[in-house]
Amino acid sequence: MRKLVLFSLLIALSICVNAQKVENLALTPPMGWNSWNTFGTDINEQLVMQTADAFVELGLKDAGYKYIVLDDGWMAKERDENNNLVPDPKKFPGGIKSLVDYVHSKGLKFGLYECAGNQTCAGYPGSRGFEYQDAKLFAEWGIDFLKYDWCNSENLNAKGAYETMRDALYACKQPIVFSICEWGDNEPWKWAKDVGHMWRVTGDIINCWDCEVSHGNWSSRGIWPIINLHKDLRKYAGPGHWNDLDMMEVGNGMTDSEDRVHFAMWSLLTSPLILGNDLRTMSKETLKTLVNKNVIAVNQDVLGVQAYCHLKSPELEIWVKPLDNEEWAVAFVNRSNEELQLSFDWWKHPINDQLTHKELEKKYKSYSIYDLYASKNIGLTNTNLVSKIKEHDVLLLKLSPQK
């Protein structure tokens, strides 16, 4: 009898551990919007509804964005008499369920924020000790995505805490993308593949090209510090489990060219594409960048292979990402403050990915070169690539073999 019980427990554990694979969630990096970068805790139901409307009206939904995620500050400061989380009645007088229903009515998906600690980062009730109760409530509301933070988590084991919430979500039998947000402090890329669908690899992003802002015991980082901090984690990313470089700052004060680089690099590095700007007021140029289906296709490529840095100098970085159908994405990023004159010999520095063992094959006559931002063919790889790249801008290409 004891052997039978033990066998049953092992079967149950196996089902639990492999549930993510059965769900087939996040087989490509999730795409959506999060409220935190622009609004902090200054959020309400009108903002969410208007954002959902913008997804449809501006073509973001058609471009592939589908998750609208409400970050910290959505709840009241205290749980109710039954220890349930309560939406802030002033910010969300209609409650969360009606908001979820509205977002779903637009053909979109809804996400919420919570925290593994006693309190959230903004001081609202955390899920510590209430994981199963909170997960049940989220499932009853119909959420599709949970961002789970790591503030006020003293004496908790990160892997164990996130496994507890994972199991609580599985117990609800509802497919929910689980976003691990413990800032990379405990190297989640080494243990989170069977725990969550995406994991932050760094602290919070900030809207600058190349800066770091100290907050005492942690720092906010700009675009390039985030890229350089954990650029060697590509072997851990793949369908259903992604390195998360944080919500994007496209449209939040950098130049249009810097935004193009930002969007290109997040796409090349297979990071979830989570918008962090005010969609209702963004410029036409910002929208043009965010709905560029050529660039999005690089991020959503079914191979799910993260790019690597092929060549690097103080002025120029070349990043390469193998794609399906023997194609490649290649980015030439001008890091300098002056226009760059580019002349690149494709065969002088052969492209050879050590992770996938794919390479630019000389067996093909050539590769055609397609400019993904300009949406045009610009030649073949049998001659040098000659181009001008503005300061802090990118030439993002797709190479397709001529068979």
Image (cartoon, helix red, strand yellow):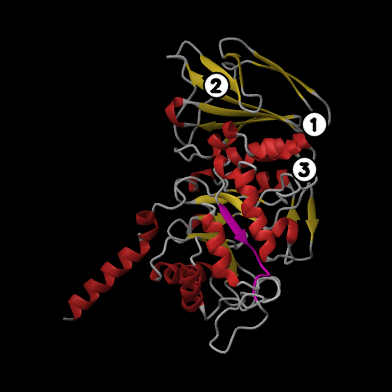
Is 220 placed above or below 301 here?
A: below
Residues under numbered marks 2 and 1 in contact, where contact means CB atoms less than 8 Å apart: no
33 falls in the magenta region = no
Residue 350 tag number: 2
**Foreground of the two, 130 or 244:** 130
Location of the N terminus (image quadrant):
bottom left
Query: Which quarter of the figure has residue 168?
Result: bottom left
Image spot of residue 80 (x, y percent)? 59, 86
Q: Earlier in the sequence, mark 2 or mark 3?
A: 3
Above or below, 383 relative to 292:
above
The CA distance from mark 3 to mark 1 is: 11 Å
Residue at disc 3, secondary structure: loop
| Cα separation between marks 2 and 3 | 29 Å
Q: Position of residue 308 (x, y in %)?
A: 57, 36
**What residue span does the magenta drawing correspond to?**
67-75
> Label 2 is placed on what type of residue?
Pro
Task: Indicate the secondary structure of the residue bearing disc 1.
Answer: loop
Residue 319: which disc? none
Is residue 148 something that shows in the picture? no
Q: Residues within 10 Å of mark 1 (few under 14, many from 20)?
A: some
Q: Amino acid at mark 3?
A: Trp
Q: Is residue 146 shown above or below 61?
A: below
* Residue type pointed to by label 1: Ser
- Spot the residue most to the left: 1
Dot label at residue 209: 3
| Dot 3 alpha-carbon crowd within 10 angstroms: few under 14, some 14 to 19, many 20 or more | some
Q: Which residue is mark 1?
A: 336
Q: Say if 273 sits above or below 302 in the image.
A: below
Q: Upstream in the sequence, badge 2 or badge 1? A: 1
Q: Is residue 73 magenta?
A: yes
